């Protein structure tokens, strides 16, 4: 298990999900169209693998996954 850092998350988003577009901590991922629902599922899988935390399906909502900052905040709170 590795710690999830902002830099690591932004790098993953840029290299794996947005086709190389730079992503800032407060960029809206879904509303801007940077990633789609399939991208979110890939992101969830990546987050679970990186942190060894299980993300419940009911927690995969815009509030938790709209921005990289929201993702990090959610992951910090996840038991």
Image: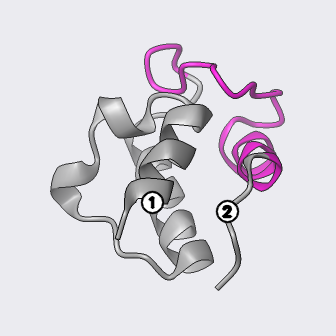
Classify residue 37 by image quadrant. Answer: top left
Determine the residue positioned at 24% across, 51% down.
59
In the image, 39: left or right of 41? right
Residue that sits furthest to the top in the current view: 32
Pointer 2 local density, CA inside 10 Å: few below 14, some 14–19, many at least 20: some
Image depth: mark 2 or mark 1 in front: 2
Picture coordinates of residue 17 (x, y %)? 65, 44
| Residue 33: x %, y % from top left | 52, 20
The residue under the point 74% across, 56% down is 5
Say which residue label 1 marks: 44
Q: Residue furthest left?
A: 58
Tell me which residue sits at (63%, 20%) in the image. Answer: 26
Quarter that holds the C terminus = bottom left
In x, y percent, where is residue 8? 79, 55
Tag 2's secondary structure? loop
Q: Nearer the viewer, residue 23 or 42?
A: 23
Q: Which residue corresponds to mark 2?
A: 4
* Marked residue nearer the N-terminal end (2 or 1): 2
Badge 1 marks a residue whose secondary structure is helix
Q: Give the Cα distance between marks 2 and 1.
A: 13 Å
Q: Is residue 19 magenta?
A: yes
In the picture shown, does residue 55 fall above or below 41? below
Crowdedness near tag 1: few (<14), some (14–19) or many (≥20) residues, C-alpha within 10 Å: some
Instruction: Provide the residue span drawn in magenta.
Output: 7-33
Residue 65 in percent (x, y) is at: 43, 38
Q: Is residue 67 above or below residue 71?
A: above
The answer to which quarter of the image holds residue 57 is bottom left
Q: Quadrant of the N terminus?
A: bottom right
Residue occupying the point 54% across, 26% down: 29
Q: Judge by depth and name the residue closer to the eye, 68 or 3.
A: 3
CB-based contact (under 8 Å), mark 2 and mark 1? no
Q: Give the vertical position of 5 relative to 3 (above or below).
A: above
């Amino acid at each position: 298990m590795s710690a999830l850092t902002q830099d690591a998350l932004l790098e993953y988003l840029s290299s794996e999900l947005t086709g190389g577009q730079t992503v800032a901590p407060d960029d809206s991922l879904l509303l801007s169209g940077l990633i789609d629902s399939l991208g979110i599922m890939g992101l969830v899988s990546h987050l679970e693998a990186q942190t060894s935390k299980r993300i419940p399906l009911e927690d995969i909502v815009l509030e938790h996954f709209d921005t990289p900052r929201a993702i990090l905040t959610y992951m910090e709170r996840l038991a």
